Image: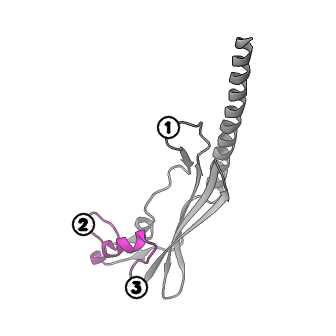
Amino acid sequence: MRHLGSCAVAMTAIFLLTGCERAKTKLDREVDRLCAVDGGVHVYETVKLPKENFGPGGEVFPEYRAQIRSGGGLGPDFTWNTNVREIVAGDPSLTRWEQSISRVQDGKLLGKRVVYIRGGGDFLGPWGTSEYSCRNVPSDLTQKVFFQ
């Protein structure tokens, strides 16, 4: 009888955990689909800048880097925008991240970077949550829009 109770508990746990993994796998496939549709880096216009606007490591506008991290601009001539939209709430979740660079003078969108991210949906445990996102998307949009 005790063996039967243990089997019932094990079967229930497997059933519940399989449901979690199925939801996670389903969202991973949705991430792949959305990344194929509009994910990645899209450059609409490149801008040549003088070498003074590049740091020693090739980073663009090093004097404004702190502003970018806090949602600010790229100096007086360009703006950096971040738009985060939660598509699926909960655990697992699905989020769309869009970062864009625009020119202040005419408001023209110069480029954008779009990444879809699935977060969570893991078995309970002491480890952190996993993520799954678009593959092969360059992390630095400024390097694609601006050049010397």
Judged left or right of residue 54, residue 137 is: right
For disc 1, the neighbor class at 10 Å (few under 14, some 14 to 19, many from 20) is few
Judged left or right of residue 141, residue 117 is: right
Name the residue tied to disc 2.
56
- Amino acid on which the number 3 mark rests in the picture: Pro
Q: Position of residue 80 (x, y in %)?
A: 47, 74
Name the residue tied to disc 3.
76
Query: Foreground mark, 3 or 2?
Result: 3
Q: Position of residue 74 (x, y in %)?
A: 41, 77
SS assignment at label 1 = loop
- Amino acid on which the number 2 mark rests in the picture: Pro
For disc 2, the neighbor class at 10 Å (few under 14, some 14 to 19, many from 20) is few
Judged left or right of residue 17, residue 83 is: left
Q: Which residue is found at the position 42% from the left and 76% from the top?
A: 47
Q: Quadrant of the C terminus?
A: bottom left
SS assignment at label 3 = loop
Q: Is residue 10 above or below residue 38?
A: above
CA gap, disc 3 and disc 1:
46 Å
Q: Is residue 122 one of those drawn in magenta?
A: no
Q: Is residue 101 above or below residue 95?
A: below
Name the residue tied to disc 1.
126
Q: Which residue is found at the position 31% from the left and 75% from the top?
A: 63
Its colouring scheme is one colour
**Numbered mark located on residue 84 in the image:** none
- Amino acid on which the number 1 mark rests in the picture: Pro
**Segment tinted magenta in the rendering:** 50-75
